[in-house]
Image: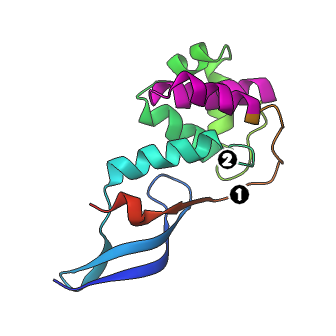
């Protein structure tokens, strides 16, 4: 089987663009396909979202909610908002969501806690989140070498 390393691949399978760098590729049935573990990629994306230097987008919020298998109502209850508010956030698509910064910080800390982060990691993230990120959307960048299947 033929293999190669692709410098950049943009994956949109999570509902938003994720730029993968140094992607191992396999030639399967005439098509070059990333040779990565998508379960590990999902976890890496969640880690990146928790520390993202820009506000979360609607599609990123939807990905978080769906990854943790939460209904609109469950997600809304967890963050003390209405399910209509969550629906409005998700409808923002690839635009930054207009949540209160405290709610977004809670969502980011929730992500890391559900990924079984150590208390020191949660404390570090809490400190990092004291500085409010910029409003503009920013893509996630990940080095795919650690995600090879």
> Which stretch is magenta?
101-127
Badge 1 element: loop
Q: Residues within 10 Å of mark 1 (few under 14, many from 20)?
A: some
**Percent x, y for residue 67?**
43, 36
**Magenta-drawn stretch contains 3:** no
**Magenta-drawn stretch contains 105:** yes
Mark 2 in CB contact with mark 1 (< 8 angstroms): yes
**Percent x, y for residue 105?**
71, 28
**Circle number at residue 138:** 1
The image's colouring method is rainbow
Q: What residue does disc 2 label?
A: 52
**Circle number at residue 120:** none
Quadrant housing residue 97? top right
Q: Residues within 10 Å of mark 2 (few under 14, many from 20)?
A: some
Residue drawn at the location 35% of the way across and 73% of the way down:
24
Q: Earlier in the sequence, mark 2 or mark 1?
A: 2
Q: CA distance from mark 2 to mark 1?
A: 8 Å
* Drawn side of residue 31 relative to residue 69, left or right: left
Which dot, 2 or 1, sits closer to the camera? 2
Q: Quadrant of the N terminus?
A: bottom left
Q: Quadrant of the C terminus?
A: bottom left
**Percent x, y for residue 104?**
71, 30
Q: Nearer the viewer, residue 35 or 94?
A: 35
Quadrant housing residue 18? bottom right
Residue drawn at the location 40% of the way across and 65% of the way down:
145
Q: Is residue 63 above or below residue 140?
A: above
């Amino acid at each position: 089987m033929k293999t190669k390393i692709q410098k950049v691949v943009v994956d949109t399978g999570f509902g938003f663009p994720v730029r993968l760098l140094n992607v191992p590729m396999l030639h399967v049935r005439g098509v070059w396909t990333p040779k990565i573990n998508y379960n590990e990629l999902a976890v890496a994306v969640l880690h990146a979202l928790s520390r993202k230097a820009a506000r979360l987008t609607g599609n990123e919020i939807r990905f978080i909610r769906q990854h943790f298998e939460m209904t609109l109502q469950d997600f809304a209850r967890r963050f003390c908002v209405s399910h209509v508010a969550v629906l409005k956030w998700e409808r923002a698509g690839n635009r930054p969501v207009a949540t209160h910064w405290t709610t977004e910080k809670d969502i980011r800390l929730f992500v890391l806690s559900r990924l079984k982060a150590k208390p020191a990691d949660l404390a570090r993230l809490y400190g990092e989140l004291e500085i409010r990120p910029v409003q503009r959307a920013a893509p996630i960048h990940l080095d795919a070498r650690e995600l090879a299947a």
